[in-house]
Image (cartoon, rainbow, N blue to C red):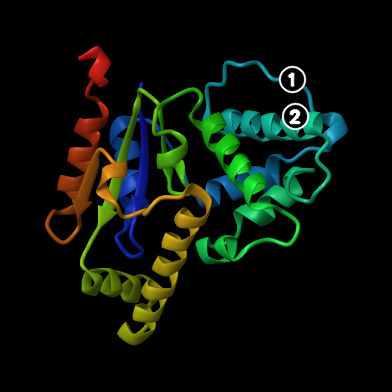
Amino acid sequence: MAIVTLSGQIGANAREIGRLVAERLSIDYVDQEILIEAARELGVPMESVVSHDERTETLSERLAHMVTNFLERSAAAGAADPMLGGAGGLDMVLSQTYAEAAAGMDDVSDDEYVQAMANLIQDVAGHDNVLLIGRGSQVVLREHPNATHVLIVGPEELRVANIAQRDGISTKEAEKIVHSQEKGRVSFHEKFFKIQVNDPSHYHLTLNVGRLTQDQIVSIIGDAAQLPAPDDA
């Protein structure tokens, strides 16, 4: 049983590393894009929400269960705003970049946003065997006994080069993206989760893509995730 949360500096290839770790451990991989697609494709009208069996075996079933759980909580709370009133609003909120979310939303309070993210992350992690990318998952699941929290960092010049190669753009353009998106990432975690996201004390592991190969990083995370929790050791 393993849960891994992965947070990475912009351009450190955290998503690619996450997919490889999930494959190595034979666990599900969930990032922002997958959550957006689940909210978009699996959203149902409030009146059609039905209870689901707690046993979910596949990722698609788990995400469906996550969305319906979210809607059930919203209905019970009498929520009426676009985000909490249905999955259609949820996918729009999830689509926001870190910087956009940190800048604030007209129809959603900061407390509602944090609670929504916490609910989603807890639901996805509820059956273990999942790797989650970002969005405060390392904070929401910090007390989870089966969770391994990992930070991926790297020298700026390498991260800029990665973005330039990925997007087919100039180094100067890539520098702007790295600076802007990293600033948004830092602001997001400061605003909503009250942490310095690159502080290694929030993680079990901090791994540097400038010092280790991708294969080494994947191997280290995979091995760490399979270690027993301290109370079980």
> Dot 1 surroundings within 10 Å: few (below 14), some, or many (20 or more)?
few
x, y percentage for residue 8? 34, 55
How many dots with numbers?
2
Q: Secondary structure at mark 2?
A: helix
Disc 1 target residue: 51
- Residue furthest toward the left? 211
Q: Residue at x 22, y 62 (%)?
A: 154
Type of the residue with mark 2: Glu
Q: Secondary structure at mark 1?
A: loop
Asked whether the residues under the numbered discs 1 and 2 touch, taking CB atoms below 8 Å apart as contact, a structural biologist would say yes
Horizontal side of residue 172 vs 157, given as left or right? right
| Residue placed most toward the observer, 143 or 57 | 143
Q: Quadrant of the N terminus?
A: top left
Type of the residue with mark 1: Ser
Disc 2 target residue: 72
**Quarter of the rendering containing residue 212:** bottom left
x, y percentage for residue 72? 75, 29
Q: Residue at x 49, y 22 (%)?
A: 127
Horizontal side of residue 75 vs 191, given as left or right? right
Give the foreground label among 1 and 2. Answer: 2
x, y percentage for residue 232? 25, 13
Q: Earlier in the sequence, mark 1 or mark 2?
A: 1
- Residue furthest toward the front? 194
Horizontal side of residue 107 vs 188, given as left or right? right
- Which disc, if any, is residue 150? none
x, y percentage for residue 63? 59, 34
Q: Marks 1/2: CA distance?
A: 9 Å
**Quarter of the rendering containing residue 153:** bottom left
